[in-house]
Image (cartoon, rainbow, N blue to C red):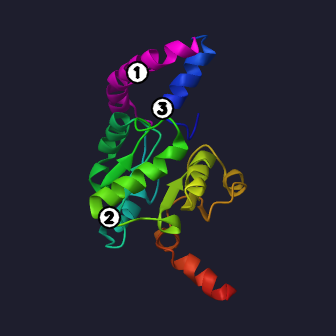
Amino acid sequence: MAGKTDPQIVRELLLRGGCAPESIAPLSAEVLRLYLERFGPALSASPRPRLFPGVRELLVRLADAPEVLLGLLTGNVADGAALKLDRFGLKSHFRLGAFGSDSADRRALVPIAVERAHELTGRRYVGRSVVVIGDTPLDIDCGRVAGATTIAVATGPYSLAELESHSPHALFPDFTAIEPVMAAILGNGRRAAERSER
């Protein structure tokens, strides 16, 4: 299920459970309502959720960078994402987002985020100036389809080798070393590589 949107996960589970396809839409809304009702208290009570090394520091650096507009792109529905961000005090770093509640299709989320960025700033964000960071092959795929720079990090269920096989533009074991990650996000490493190829 890693990397899929919440609505896609619910749909697949309902189909596996024998639900008729025409019944999925109303049932899916109810499943997601019940999920959110239970998720907040479960998240608060769980000792398991943790913030990976370097994430908070990286977000602070990116939020302070004048050339960066920081948005959250996630398969979580918006209310579920807000609960997760609130748990770690990260919500204020993100100026916009695109969520599973916007579309069950992961590939549709980058264009949604890009359009929201345009509405917010008046600027058009295109191609490799858009950066998608994630820890699953589906994150890499949604960025690639949109023509974005893709950065993978092996802090999720996929190993470095598994993520590398999907050819992200940059790949990191985690975000402990922030400077190389910043260079990849801001395009410094890419520009240096392009200069060396000339």
Query: Distance from label 1 to label 3 (Cα)?
Result: 11 Å
Q: Is residue 184 visible?
A: yes
Mark 2 secondary-structure assignment: helix
Q: Tell me the kind of residue under disc 2.
A: Ala
Q: Quadrant of the C terminus?
A: bottom right
**CB contact under 8 Å: marks 1 and 3:** no
Which label sits in the foreground, 1 or 2?
A: 1
Which label sits in the foreground, 1 or 3?
A: 1
Q: Tell me the kind of residue under disc 3.
A: Asp
Q: Give the range drawn in magenta.
A: 20-48
Q: Quadrant of the N terminus?
A: top right
**For residue 80, which quarter of the picture?**
top left
Q: Main secondary structure of the magenta part?
A: helix
Residue, disc 1? 29
Q: Residue at x 33, y 35 (%)?
A: 79
Residue 17 location, x and y as percent? 60, 12
Residue 41 location, x and y as percent? 32, 26
**For residue 20, which quarter of the picture?**
top right
Q: Tell me the kind of residue under disc 1.
A: Ala
Q: Is residue 2 magenta?
A: no
| Foreground pick, 134 / 141 | 141
Q: Earlier in the sequence, mark 1 or mark 3?
A: 3
Whether residue 137 is situated above or below residue 100 in the rendered picture: below
| Neighbourhood count class around disc 2 (C-alpha, 10 Å): few under 14, some 14–19, many 20 upward | some
**CB contact under 8 Å: marks 2 and 3:** no
Residue, disc 2? 63
Mark 1 secondary-structure assignment: helix
Number of the label disc, if any, that sits on residue 6: 3
| Foreground pick, 78 / 175 | 78
